[in-house]
Amino acid sequence: MSAVETALKPIAAKAARCTACVLAETRTKVVFGSGSARAGIVIIGEAPGANEDAQGLPFVGRSGQLLDRLLTETGIVRDDVYICNVVKCRPPQNRDPRPEEVATCAPFLRAQLETLRPRVLCALGLHATRWLLPGKEPMAKLRGQILEYRSIPTIATYHPAAILRNPRLKDNALADLKRVREIAEDAAKREA
């Protein structure tokens, strides 16, 4: 077990026991996050879906399968990145997380990011982007830029679910993920 995994373990255990919001009443499993800090990339989604709730792992359903293909196409190894969500429990019927649910889960995500100390963040979709970068700009305006969350370079891109609904968004998402990889690689070179 790596030092990062060891450091995340008590945070994950606390999340697994959390009953601070109504999402705890309907969840099957807490979906804390998975992966490695090896590449220095943290990918953040909105909330678990039905497949994630059943398995306790992020991005394992149709959106996760597409994310896997996008990562592969951009030369990112999924096992080398850490993937998590803003909200750790599935909202009923996959509705959007409510502001109070996001606020309740925020300390878990902050603790994950402080522990992982990523070189770059990738926000999948507008909900994850709004958590990292509050504002009102649409995704079309935010994506393609290097933004910052607490001095960490941050790339906002389309959520795989949006790409499944509108395949024309795929090329933009691929370009964004390539930029994520480049930022992580450049940072690793500077650290070496």
Image (cartoon, rainbow, N blue to C red):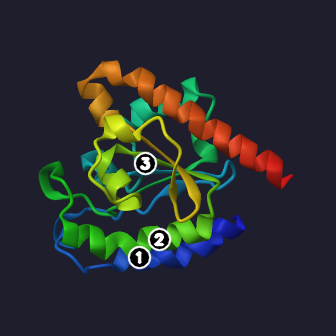
Residue 82 % position (x, y): 55, 53
Spatial CA distance of label 2 from label 1 is 5 Å
Per the image, label 2 sits on a secondary structure element best described as helix
Say above or below: 162 vs 134.
Answer: above
Q: Amino acid at mark 3?
A: Ala
How packed mark 1 is, by other alpha carbons closer than 10 Å (few <14, some 14-19, many 20 or more), is some
Q: Is residue 36 above or below residue 163?
A: below
User: For the residue marked with disc 1, what is the amino acid?
Assistant: Pro
Q: Are marks 2 and 1 in contact (CB under 8 Å)?
A: yes
Which mark is on residue 123?
A: 3
Image quadrant where one finds the N terminus = bottom right
Q: CA distance from mark 3 to mark 1?
A: 17 Å
The residue that mark 1 highlights is 107
Name the residue rendered at 19%, 58% in the picture. 91
Q: Can you give x and y, in whole percent of width and height, for residue 16 in the image? A: 38, 73
Residue 110 disc label: 2
The mark nearer the N terminus, 3 or 1, is: 1
Q: Which image quadrant is residue 19 in?
A: bottom left
